[in-house]
Image (cartoon, rainbow, N blue to C red):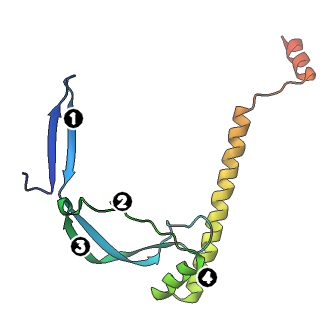
């Protein structure tokens, strides 16, 4: 057994190619407090919630001890508008700052929506073949 955190196994196949497998032996979890996060914009409403700049705790576990976990992938929880505001208040953000975050988030959502609409229109224009009228066809024949 390898003592490094990552053990690499190599097996050969019939066709002469080499298949690589990576096995992790430990997992380290970093815990962060909630904070304002501009890139974590919710799609519906509310201010963006992200992670604080620095973690406040770490835990490490050996992965071979956790193979019997019921949910190995974890859970993603989505906060609603009021929960997001409560988290930012608990993180010592001023109410005025939180309202500015909300207005900024509305502006970003509107900008993203407008961009998506522009792209849809552009795609529709490129997919749709040009329809010639009888006047257009007569003009092109006269020039030739």
Assess disc 3: are there few (<14), some (14-19) or many (≥20) residues with their C-alpha within 10 Å of its C-alpha.
few
> In which image quadrant can residue 71 be found?
bottom left
Identify the disc placed on residue 73: 2
Question: Residue drawn at (66%, 46%), measured in percent from left and top?
Answer: 119
Report the side of 60 relative to 89 (left or right): left
| Mark in front: 4 vs 3 | 3
Closer to the camera in the image, 97 or 78: 78
Closer to the camera in the image, 62 or 125: 62
First in sequence, mark 3 or 1: give its number: 1
| Mark in front: 2 vs 3 | 2
SS under mark 2: loop
Report the side of 49 relative to 137 (left or right): left
Assess disc 4: are there few (<14), some (14-19) or many (≥20) residues with their C-alpha within 10 Å of its C-alpha.
some
SS under mark 1: strand
SS under mark 3: strand
Assess disc 2: are there few (<14), some (14-19) or many (≥20) residues with their C-alpha within 10 Å of its C-alpha.
few
Q: Which residue is mark 1?
A: 19
Question: Residue drawn at (23%, 63%), measured in percent from left and top?
Answer: 66
Q: Which residue is mark 3?
A: 59
Identify the disc placed on residue 99: 4
Q: What separation in Å lies between label 1 and label 2 (alpha carbons)?
A: 25 Å
SS under mark 4: helix
Where is residue 139 shown, x and y percent of the image? 89, 18
First in sequence, mark 2 or 3: give its number: 3
Question: Residue drawn at (8%, 52%), measured in percent from left and top?
Answer: 2
| Mark in front: 1 vs 2 | 2
Closer to the camera in the image, 10 or 106: 10
Closer to the camera in the image, 22 or 40: 22
Q: What separation in Å lies between label 2 and label 3 (alpha carbons)?
A: 17 Å
């Amino acid at each position: 057994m390898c003592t490094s955190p990552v053990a690499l196994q190599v097996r050969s196949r019939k066709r002469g190619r080499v298949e690589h497998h990576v096995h992790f032996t430990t997992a380290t979890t970093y815990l962060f407090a909630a904070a304002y996060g501009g890139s974590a914009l919710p799609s519906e409403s509310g201010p963006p919630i992200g992670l604080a700049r620095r973690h406040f705790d770490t835990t490490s576990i050996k992965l071979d001890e956790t193979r019997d976990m019921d949910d190995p992938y974890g859970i993603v929880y989505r906060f609603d508008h009021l929960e997001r505001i409560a988290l930012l208040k608990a993180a010592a953000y001023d109410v005025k700052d939180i309202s500015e975050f909300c207005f900024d988030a509305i502006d970003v959502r509107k900008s993203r929506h407008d961009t998506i609409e522009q792209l849809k229109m552009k795609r529709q224009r490129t997919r749709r073949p040009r329809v010639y009228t009888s006047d257009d066809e007569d003009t092109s024949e006269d020039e030739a």
